[in-house]
Each structure stands twice: as C-alpha cells, then as structure tokens.
C-alpha cells in the first residue's frame, strides 16, 4: 500500500487520504504515511471532526477492491484506475486504425462499447467504460452450436470449455501453464462432456518457450523460469486430422495475434466464429480485427466489454466475507475483459 501511495504521488496526484478495508491495515499503514488513513467502517463520517473532507475521486489499486466501485460511486465519488502515462499520445497516433475498426463493427452497441473502451483508457475513469450484461463469450450468434468443433485457447480452470461443451460442441481446450493444466484436468476428469485437454500454449509455430506462472495471468515470458510447449493451430488441425474448426475462443494473455498468425490457414478455410480477448496489449484494439479482416474480408465484427466474475476464483474467504458484509457482488468492473466477436 505504501508503494501505491508513493506511486500516485510520483504522478503528481494530490492525495487527501487512504481508504483501507480493515482496522489492522489502518494501524500498520499509519506508521508509514503522512495522510489520514480511513477504514470503510469510517467512510460515512467524512467531513466530521477528525475526518478529512470527502474526496471527489478515489483510485482503486487492486482487483478485489474494484468490487467497491459501485459503493464509492453511490457516494458521489469518481472511481479511477491506473492508466499508462503514454496512452494519450499512443492512442492519438493510431486514430486512423481505431477509426477503421470502428467502421468494421456491425451494431451501434458495439460502436458505443468500443468508443467507451478508448475513452476509459484515456481518462482512467472506471465508469467511462460500458459493461455488457450477457455472460462473457456468449453474445447471441457468436458462440458454438451443437455439433461444432470448438477451440478453447486459454482454458485455465476448464469453466469455459465446459460451457462450450454444454452447447453441444466437441471442445479442444489448450492450457499452457502446468499448474493450471493439472487443476483443469482434475476438474474435467470423468466429465460427461466431449473435451480434449492439451498442455500446449497456442502460438504462431511449434516451439518450447519460457513462461511466467501466475494463475489466470500466466503468460509467455522470455524471462520466465518455467518452460512450456507451444503449437500453432494450423499444425494441430493437420496432426489431429480435424475435418473443420467452427469456433475459436482466445484469452492467452497477449499472444492472441501470434496465435491468429498460426491459424491463418484454418481461419481462411473454415471462417470459424471467434471470441478474441482484445485488451492485453494496447494495440489489440486495432491489430486483431485488421488482421482477421485481411484473412477473410467477409468477417463481421462485434465488440463487448465485461466485468470480471470472481464467483469461482481469485477471492479468499476473508475477502468474500467483506463483500458479503457490504452487500457487494463478485462482479468486478475493470479495464480488462474486452472481447472482439467475429463471424
């Protein structure tokens, strides 16, 4: 927390106080910072004796605390998240590409969500983003149908693979991280669904590469201390003699464009429906759709942004108890979970 305080100050932000969840955090933090430390229990007392005036803006600096975004907003506070210092110049430089993708989007809803994604990144204001209501990856007309052959890139704990299998699809699920793969395999063991789980990462070629393990955020990293096998989808389809590919979902922590390069033949031949994560890299907002369109000019696109559903992961018992105490849901609004839909 002291690092976060110093980081905000280094960016020229005038901090009037720090809000923490519990008394024990306040007691510890007060030893290291020179501004008031307020607990959420004290939150309603802003402006009273011995309490600072209520701030107009609050920076939320962890995923779990983003569950309190609506709580703070209901008290008239603007909720901010970290944004890249260079994001404005970077975005302005690539306005032509962004405008091109905007023109590719089929519906007004997608265009509004896309513009909101750009605005939210520029301002850092959480509620400049727009969040969709349907479950992630399940926009009407863009998910697998009965009899489809589906690719789940980034299976993590198997939840999405199971969801696609419930649609009646034959699912080939890929999970790079050894620990995630083990947990996913345990969940799928004895499953009634038609799911093949592979301990591969998806990329543009067959290789063995380093990666950094981080649960849901595990990613390919040349400085990582673990190694994983990677394969391109075109080679996998050929080796497995798959008759076709009808659907592809990708959430592979920034390797999406590489994977699409390694699936060029499959995409060009079969034109699968796709749901591609478009937020791990700033340029994902324009490079992914542009490349897919170059493979098949007849692709249609939609765009949505989702809250993270932490019902099944990433919260410990204490954090769940805190959310329950304050009457908050497990849905976390973040700058992540943007999805480009293709068909």
Image: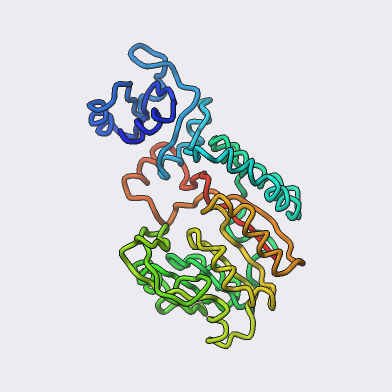
Image point 58% across, 39% down: which residue? 89
The N terminus - image quarter: top left
Relative to residue 11, is residue 283 depicted above or below? below
Count how many numbered circles sit on residues in the image: 0
Colour mode of the rendering: rainbow
From the viewer's perspective, is residue 220 above or below residue 247?
Answer: above
- Relative to 5, 266 lies left or right: right
- Residue 230 position in % (x across, y down): 45, 74
Q: Which percent across, then down, holds residue 176?
A: 42, 69
Q: Residue 213: image x %, image y %?
A: 35, 61
Q: Is residue 195 above or below residue 321?
A: below
Q: Quadrant of residue 21?
A: top left
What residue lies at 54% left-to-right and 63% top-to-bottom?
256
Q: Residue at x 35, y 44 (%)?
A: 321
Give x and y (percent) for residue 209: 39, 70
Q: Quadrant of residue 219?
A: bottom left
Q: 165 or 213: which is nearer to us?
A: 213
Q: Residue at x 40, y 42 (%)?
A: 62
Taking 308 as reference, is 15 left or right? left
Location of the C terminus (image quadrant): bottom right
Query: Which sits in the foreground, 206 or 246?
Result: 206
Image-quadrant location for residue 105:
bottom right
Foreground residue, 138 or 110? Answer: 110
Residue placed most toward the observer, 54 or 177: 177
């Amino acid at each position: 927390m002291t690092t976060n305080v110093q980081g905000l100050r280094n960016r020229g932000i005038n901090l009037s106080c720090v809000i923490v969840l519990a008394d024990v955090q306040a007691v510890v933090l007060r030893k290291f910072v020179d501004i008031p430390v307020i607990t959420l229990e004290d939150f309603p007392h802003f402006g009273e004796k011995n309490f600072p005036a209520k701030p107009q803006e609050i920076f939320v600096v962890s995923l779990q605390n983003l569950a309190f975004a609506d709580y703070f907003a209901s008290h008239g506070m603007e909720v901010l998240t970290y944004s890249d210092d260079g994001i404005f110049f970077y975005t302005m430089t690539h306005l032509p590409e962004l405008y091109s993708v905007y023109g590719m989007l089929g519906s007004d809803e997608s265009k509004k969500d896309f513009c909101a994604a750009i605005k939210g990144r520029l301002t850092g204001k959480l509620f400049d983003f727009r969040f969709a209501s349907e479950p992630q990856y399940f926009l009407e007309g863009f998910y697998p149908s009965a009899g489809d052959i589906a690719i789940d890139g980034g299976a993590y704990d198997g939840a999405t693979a199971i969801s696609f299998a419930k649609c009646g699809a034959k699912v080939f699920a890929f999970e790079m991280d050894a620990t995630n793969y083990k947990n996913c395999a345990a969940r799928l063991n004895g499953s009634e669904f038609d799911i093949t789980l592979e301990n591969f990462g998806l990329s543009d070629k067959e290789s063995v590469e380093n990666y950094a393990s981080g649960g849901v955020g595990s990613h390919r990293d040349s400085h990582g201390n673990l190694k994983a096998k990677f394969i391109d989808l075109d080679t996998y389809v050929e080796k497995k003699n798959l008759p076709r590919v009808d659907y592809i979902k990708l959430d592979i922590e920034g390797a999406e464009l590489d994977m699409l390069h390694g699936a060029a033949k499959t995409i060009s031949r079969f034109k699968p429906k796709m749901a591609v994560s478009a937020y791990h890299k700033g340029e994902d907002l324009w490079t992914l759709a542009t490349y897919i369109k170059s493979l098949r000019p007849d692709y249609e696109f939609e765009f949505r942004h989702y809250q993270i559903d932490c019902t099944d992961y990433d919260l410990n018992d204490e954090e769940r108890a805190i959310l329950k105490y304050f009457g908050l849901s497990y849905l976390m609004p973040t700058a992540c979970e943007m999805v480009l839909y293709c068909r």
